[in-house]
Image (cartoon, rainbow, N blue to C red):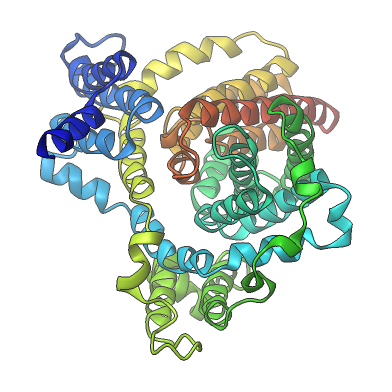
């Protein structure tokens, strides 16, 4: 018996030749690139950070997320960027995005765990307006997600599990069908588009101010909103219609799905879920008001936005859920922590956020020499080009850069490159500046491109890294083509 057990465990530990090669490549990149001589403007530290970044990208698409993350902790500590291993771990695990994701799991994860996704599937697919056209249903969902993204960016952890419930209930195969990847990718795209619509807050406002100082003209935020809104609607429409064909989405399973086959529990929201939605909805509402001009400047909402912050709101929400009675006469709170946290907390997501965001940020810091190298490569592309080419290159280059590193750092670098050429070309400066800033917000392809991207790539029900990358590359292609077709004529017509 012991021999059989030992053989079974040994078989489980066996790696295929391809896995061995991928593991070797990951470790060589993380720990070996730093020993190569620096090139161009990169510093020795820049080489070490670059190696860790490349190893993470390769490892996450070919290997186990948690294992790669642990190696990345060690490798990043050896770069010397944060002053040593302990400081590196502190900067990674102490990242605010990691904490926000953790407390969000307590709220949104518990809501899905107790049946909200099943109820939403039954309720939404039983609407007559959607029964005849599942593709219209998908489009409406993505549009609603885009609106949600305008105010609250941290919605991936709630929406993707709900989409997974829709896939499960409609009978989509976990391995063969692309429905989950396509739908969750659309959620990532929609939230990112919504998050970039308004450039009057956060790092986007900082980039807008930088653009105004460089070109001598502020961005017209109203005009920017109209152009970006039109673009976003077109991008989502193109993604849903053409993506359905590219990824061969079988909508018949959704169209002919009989909601009556679902269990009785899906007919109504449980009392526990109804109570959960109150503090969760309140936290989201307060987070929204902290972003609205005029309202956010009041003493109360300024205190919430600057002192409590979004992370604090979600923390208070989680605490309330652990105190408020469930209403189901089981003697438990809405969120019985010890009972369900193992089921609702996704550690790969937390680990990926902890690793990718600090490393991607470090890659574009002053001490690595990456930004001067990037400037030397891309600045010549704009020299002597026509007005249309300036806009086209601005969109393409910004899309490339924001998907490999920090959107803030690369956005600032692109502004310094594109601004002078935009002034010389006589283009509408609001449109060109809007193009750079909006494109900087669309970090989709790699986990380190943005927090929502890290969450998308670490969803446990999306295990195929190749499919995830293909979906995100398709999204980038849709956005890039649509952005060029919208920004170019508008920048010329509205001089």
Name the residue located 74 percent from the left edge and 36 percent from the top edge.
250
Q: Is residue 115 left or right of residue 349?
A: right
Q: Nearer the viewer, residue 39 or 448?
A: 448
Residue 475: image location, x then y, percent? 64, 31
Residue 460 position (above or below residue 368): below
Name the residue located 71 percent from the left edge and 49 percent from the top edge.
142
Q: Is residue 200 left or right of residue 228?
A: left
Residue 415 visible, this orientation: no
Figure quadrant of residue 82: top left
Residue 160 visible, this orientation: yes
Quadrant where the image shows the C terminus:
top right
Residue 57: image location, x then y, percent? 37, 26
Q: Is residue 470 left or right of residue 231?
A: left
Task: Count the labels in the image.
Answer: 0
Quadrant where the image shows the N terminus:
top left
Q: Nearer the viewer, residue 207 or 237?
A: 237
Residue 391: image location, x then y, percent? 69, 22
Residue 111: image location, x then y, percent? 52, 69
């Amino acid at each position: 018996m012991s021999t059989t057990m030992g053989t079974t465990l040994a078989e489980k530990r066996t790696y295929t030749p391809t896995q061995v090669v991928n593991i070797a490549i990951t470790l060589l990149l993380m720990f070996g690139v730093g020993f190569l001589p620096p090139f161009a403007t990169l510093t020795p530290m820049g080489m070490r950070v670059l190696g860790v970044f490349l190893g993470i990208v390769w490892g996450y698409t070919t290997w186990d997320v948690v294992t790669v993350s642990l190696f990345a902790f060690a490798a990043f500590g050896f770069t010397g960027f944060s002053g040593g291993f302990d400081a590196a771990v502190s900067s990674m695990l102490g990242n605010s995005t990691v904490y926000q994701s953790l407390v969000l799991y307590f709220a949104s994860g518990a809501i899905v765990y107790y049946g909200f996704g099943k109820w939403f599937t039954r309720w939404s697919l039983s609407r007559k307006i959607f029964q005849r056209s599942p593709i219209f249903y998908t489009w409406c969902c993505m549009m609603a997600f885009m609106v949600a993204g305008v105010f609250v960016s941290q919605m991936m952890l709630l929406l993707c599990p709900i989409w997974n419930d829709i896939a499960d209930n409609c009978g989509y195969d976990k391995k063969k069908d692309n429905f989950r990847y396509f739908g969750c990718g659309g959620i990532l795209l929609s939230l990112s588009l919504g998050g970039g619509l308004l450039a009057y807050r956060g790092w986007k406002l900082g980039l807008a101010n930088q653009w105004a100082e460089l070109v001598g003209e502020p961005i017209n935020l109203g005009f920017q909103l109209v152009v970006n809104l039109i673009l976003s609607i077109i991008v989502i429409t193109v993604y849903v219609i053409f993506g359905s064909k590219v990824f061969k989405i079988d909508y018949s399973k959704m169209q002919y799905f009989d909601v009556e086959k679902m269990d009785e529990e899906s007919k109504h929201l449980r009392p526990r879920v109804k109570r959960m939605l109150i503090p969760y909805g309140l936290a989201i509402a307060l987070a929204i008001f902290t972003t609205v001009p005029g309202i956010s400047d009041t003493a109360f909402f300024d205190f919430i936005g600057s002192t409590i912050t979004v992370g604090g709101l979600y923390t208070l929400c989680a605490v309330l859920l652990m105190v408020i009675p469930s209403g189901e006469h089981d003697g438990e709170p809405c969120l019985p922590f010890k009972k369900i946290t193992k089921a609702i907390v996704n550690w790969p997501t937390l680990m990926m956020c902890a690793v990718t965001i600090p490393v991607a940020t470090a890659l574009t810091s002053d001490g690595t020499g990456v930004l001067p190298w990037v400037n030397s490569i891309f600045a010549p592309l704009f020299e002597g080009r026509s007005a249309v080419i300036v806009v086209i290159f601005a969109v393409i280059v910004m899309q490339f850069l924001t998907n490999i590193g920090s959107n803030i750092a690369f956005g600032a670098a692109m502004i310094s490159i594109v601004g002078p050429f935009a002034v010389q070309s006589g283009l509408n400066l609001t449109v060109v500046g809007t193009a750079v800033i909006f494109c900087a917000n669309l970090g989709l392809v790699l986990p380190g491109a943005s927090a929502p991207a890290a969450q998308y790539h670490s969803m446990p029900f999306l295990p195929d890294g190749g499919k995830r990358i293909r979906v995100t590359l398709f999204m980038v292609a849709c956005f890039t083509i649509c952005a060029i077709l919208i920004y170019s004529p508008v920048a010329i017509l509205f001089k």
